[in-house]
Image: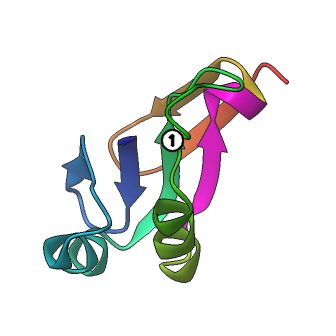
Amino acid sequence: MISLLFGKTKGLSSSLAPRSSSSAQSLDAVKPQLAIYMAGEGNRYGHPHEETLTALTEAGAEIYGTDIHGTIIITTDGEAFTKQTEK
């Protein structure tokens, strides 16, 4: 599950399941610049799924995950955003 997508449109997506056909439509609509997922290091569910990472990479998104980057802080003024990571 992708927790947050920041894109060129003003829409945000709070959940994305890239195995469905609607997810490609969602990515086209949002045009994500940044995707954040939450997953524990070495989690037993195998998150994030490779299909998810591939779809986001192909859409041009920078991908950050709590299992790799630790705490991720996004600050926005509603138009632009900055990111900070713990690691």
Disc 1 residue type (three-letter) = Ile
Q: Mark 1, residues whose alpha carbon is within 10 Å: few (<14), some, or many (≥20)?
A: many
Q: Residue furthest left?
A: 22
Residue pointed to by mark 1: 36
Left or right of residue 17, residue 72 in this image: right
Q: Quadrant of the C terminus?
A: top right
Percent across and percent down for residue 67 are: 69, 27
Query: Image quadrant for the N terminus?
Result: top left
Q: Residue at x 52, y 55 (%)?
A: 34
Magenta part of the chain: 61-68
Label count reads 1
Camera-nearest residue between 21 and 28: 21
What percent of the width, then of the height, locates residue 83?
Answer: 64, 36
Give the image location of residue 41, x and y in percent: 70, 23
Q: Hey, which quadrant is residue 82 in on the image?
A: top right
Is residue 1 rendered magenta in the image? no
Give how far across and how far down residue 66 sits, in percent. Answer: 63, 26
Q: Nearer the viewer, residue 81 or 3?
A: 3
Q: Quadrant of residue 23?
A: bottom left
| Residue in view at x 48 percent, y 68 percent | 51
Identify which residue is drawn at 47% across, 50% down.
80
- Element type where label 1 sits in the image: strand
Q: Nearer the viewer, residue 59 or 84?
A: 59
Residue 64 highlighted magenta (yes or no): yes
Q: Is residue 4 above or below residue 5?
A: above
Q: Residue at x 24, y 49 (%)?
A: 12
23 up-or-down from 59: above or below? above
